[in-house]
Amino acid sequence: MYEIKYCRMIRRHINFLIYMAVMACVVLCAGCADGLFGEDGAQHSARRIELSGEIYQEAVTRIDDNGFSDGDGIGVYIVDYKAGTPGTLQQSGNRADNVCYTYRAANSKWYSYYDVYWKDLNTHIDVYGYYPYANPESVDNYTFMVQRDQSTASADGKMGGYEASDFLWGKLIDVAPTSAALRLLLRHRMSNACVKLVKGEGFTEQEWLRASKLVLVTNLSRKASINMKDGTVKVAGSVETSATIPLKVSDEWRTIVVPQTVPAGTALFSITIGGVPYKFVKNEAFTYVSGKQMIFGIKVDKIADSGKYGFTLLSEGIVPWENDFVSHDATAKEYVIVNSTAGNLRDSIIASYKDLTKVRYMKVTGSVNANDFFFMRDHMPWLTDLNLKNVRIEGVEISGIGNGHVAKYADYELPDECFHNKKTLRSVVLPDVLRRIGNNAFHNAGLTGSLNVPEGVEEIGHDAFVGNDLIGILTLPSTLKKMGSFAFGGCGFVCPLNLPNGLEEIGDGCFSDCQNLYGKLILPSRLKKLGVRAFHNCQALEGDLVIPKYLTVIPDSAFMDCKLGGRLQLHDGITSIGNHAFAGNGFKDGLALPNRLKVLEGGNFIGNNFSGSLKIPTGLLRISEEAFAGCTFTGDVEIPEGIMHLHKRAFAGSENLQKIILPSDLELIDEEAFRDCKSLRVIECKSIFPPVVKKSAFSGVPLQDITVMVPESALNDYKQSGSWSAFGRIIAKTK
């Protein structure tokens, strides 16, 4: 029976697996009633050309006539041409960065994690694809391991050792924008060792069948370095001391091997018959060739009455990797497609003869409402993968919630808390038509990978995605206007942060602790409101920070510890800067404070590298604790009139500050206000009443080297003041 299955599988895969076909459908975005494009081909509005997430499988491939096994994933990179010249594949910043396409056997299609769009009607692309899907750490040097034990079978939806070792790669070159399907051919990039044992002399048929046989592949490195740009594979590790265990069907053993050369005189295989070992050695160096099968036919003879065996190499050859007898034979993932009407999702699932308590993978079409979302959340305990791409969300009123309260849910809105604490949920494709994502919608769910928020969404509620393991790419729509507090707080997205230019409000902690977001932080030109700690601890961001003109209040810790390292550009309309707003960024060059600045809270500029002089605006009402601590300003600093109190550590650590001019209203210089200002040599005081100087205000400063200039009428008062008597030289300022 097993032999019949094996032959059937061979026939099914014959003449393919060197050319694995994947079809990527490219579909234009739905336009307005008169079409997305005019007669001149110009694009109307900000909508883009969509690369469909559906890939049609046409060729015979792995498990059946429809292609890959259910749940198989491939990774896709897409690179734009520039001025007719091919672009270069980068780790990130391509048109598509490692987008996962997953095969669903239920309808023989591939689904992308999110849609990808053409740049325009003219720009060509190159497409790179590979299998199995992973998270390559480098497109130039992706480390891939073939499995030691390739005899393990697929189970519970997971690939066996042989399948997991089979790396495939393909590329499409110079593809013009089209609505036709794109066919991407994937080829084997590893090598395949095939050992066939043939019954020789001295065995009866039954003896041969009963004889224990074992083949191991020896003296190999199992670690590979793969260049995603051209699909080349190189050995990346040393030879393993342990042998590789092949996959066995009948008397044939196959092993996925990293392309490499085994030195002459080194054993290629260890063959054991009836407990008697034999090492297969070639006297010349042997090379495992990428994309080829290395076939060895070995006859085994039983030597009468000796308990020994003889081995004879019958054939040896290098052939195309045409067919394979192994595929994903794990239990197929059930992908349930449900067409529902609003409020009737439960009944629709039951009508499809599915056990709703066991459904894991589901695509919903038709319409749903808040009741359906709460049903999925509370009564589908195994729901893992949810596709809502073609769903219409209808509004509904739900009564009886707490003391007769009536909750109202609007059309095209994901309800508040719709998947709150839904730990099983790993993947979601949001509806194409969506206006709002509710508060706590996916708070503390189990989402992984990337997130694509579709065009049309205007608001993302507070805590919408906090508490998930989102470590892929974040795509935000051009229509987005408001993001609530902690909407993405703590998420692990690894991508540039591209904020839509129409965004007007970013809530408290919206991106706080998103430490893997990288690239330049470009704030939207229409941004009007920014929350406390909005970008706190986004440590991978870099470059200049330009505050847009409509943003006049910078809240506490808004950009703290982002480590941007560029220039800070503030506009004159800013009136208030909160505590530690710009601390820990390593900003360089000069700092121009806004002319209309009234409130400057503490610790704002700690951990920066400003140079040049500092001009403090005349309208400033307060200089708080540590306001300019640790800065590297040079030259003179004049404290404006109206400042009565220099708070603790206001200029502490400003080692390059040479002169300070104190206002006539100043009454107190607090503790450590000018601590370690080692270059300070001149203090000019305008007040006729000597300000009180706390004992530690100038600690670490060489007081004997400082000249204090005071009004002539107050010279004696300063000299007799306990606060100023320690300074080396106090003189009257001449007009």
Image (spheres, rainbow, N blue to C red):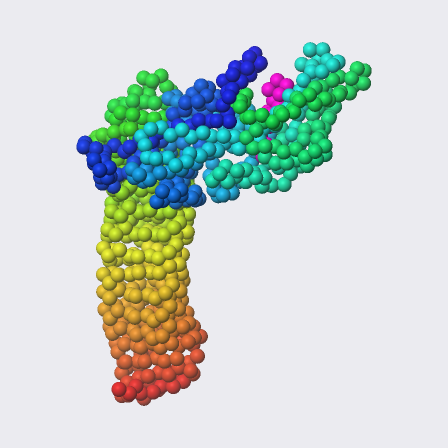
Left-right relation of 170 to 80: right
Q: Nearer the viewer, residue 633 or 401?
A: 633
Which residue appears farthest toward the right when viewing the image?
Answer: 305
Q: Residue at left 40%, top 64%?
A: 609
Which residue appears farthest toward the left when viewing the image?
Answer: 34
Q: Position of residue 194 (x, y in %)?
A: 61, 25
Q: Residue at left 28%, top 23%?
A: 340
Q: Is residue 681 above or below residue 716?
A: above
- Picture quarter containing residue 305? top right
Q: Residue at left 41%, top 24%?
A: 57
**Is any part of residue 471 visible from this angle?**
yes
Main secondary structure along the magenta-highlighted residues = strand
Q: Position of residue 569 (x, y in %)?
A: 31, 60
- Picture quarter containing residue 198? top right
- Picture quarter containing residue 312? top right
**Is any part of residue 9 visible from this angle?**
no
Q: Where is the N terminus found, in terms of image quarters?
A: top right
Left-right relation of 182 to 395: right
Q: Residue at left 44%, top 19%?
A: 65
Q: Position of residue 571 (x, y in %)?
A: 26, 61
Q: Which residues are magenta?
A: 247-258
State yes or no: residue 157 in magenta: no
Q: Position of residue 456 (x, y in %)?
A: 25, 38
Left-right relation of 91 to 640: right
Q: Where is the C terminus found, in terms of image quarters?
A: bottom left
